Image (spheres, rainbow, N blue to C red):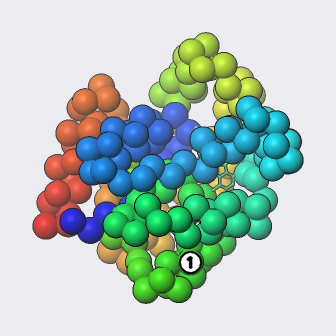
Amino acid sequence: MKARFVMVGPPGAGKGTQAKVLTEKLNIPNISTGAIFRSHIAEQTELGKLAASYIDNGNLVPDEVTDALVRDRLSQDDVAAGFLLDGYPRNLHQVDALDAMLEERGEKLDAVIELSIPDEEIVGRLLHRAQVEDRADDTEEVIRHRIEVYHAATAPLTDVYRERGILLPVDGTGTIDDVLNRLVSALESFLG
Ligand code: ADP
């Protein structure tokens, strides 16, 4: 099965959760830029220190840093059969950067899954997650800023991928299983 996927959606849409279950089901690597940054932050690497100065304020980590990280991850052997990128690309520059990385390998994306939930649900979900996961970027002020960044920088990606005919919008409301079932059937009928 074709399996080069991107997952896009506002903070709190459940990308991480769905990415995890979907990649386990499809047996492909789950590449989350946010999770990679968080593990660097936990290990207090230089990259982690740099990333934290952006992430904690709800801003995007600079493109050259993020692009290099993804390029390196995509050069590893386990992505040959497919992958799911969660959180990358996140702006129009990164769309071009990813295209270039894939083009060098003679590959292209098969589908971009757009998980959406209403803005008013985002804040509640993330404040709840803040209590469970203790993330420094899940305070109300930073959450509101991340939503703005999403609308300004990331939402325009959906137009690009829609025009390419690979955008797959999925309603992210409901239980984890509801969303997963919706997502899998949308993906199956899309890929045929
Ligand atoms: P969420 O989707 O809830 O915002 P993520 O784990 O995807 O959570 O991202 C957390 C933070 O990591 C982002 O707010 C941003 O600062 C940083 N980050 C993740 N991916 C990227 C990216 N592709 N480009 C720049 N910064 C990123």
Q: Nearer the viewer, residue 98 or 123?
A: 98
Q: Position of residue 31 (x, y in %)?
A: 51, 52
Q: Which residue is mark 1?
A: 101
Q: Check the picture and name the quadrant holding the N terminus.
A: bottom left
Task: Residue 169: give x, y in percent of width and height.
Answer: 33, 54
Name the residue rendered at 67%, 38% in the picture.
39
Whether residue 49 is visible here, answered yes or no, is yes
Image quarter of the C terminus: bottom left
> Depth check: 147 or 31 in front?
31
In screen coordinates, is 181 left or right of 104? left
In this rendering, the answer to whether 71 lies above or below 174 is below
Residue 71's x, y, as percent?
Answer: 62, 69
- Figure label count: 1
Residue at 42% x, 35% y is 17
Q: Is residue 111 visible?
A: no
Q: Taking 16 as reference, is 191 left or right?
A: left
> Callout 1, which amino acid?
Met
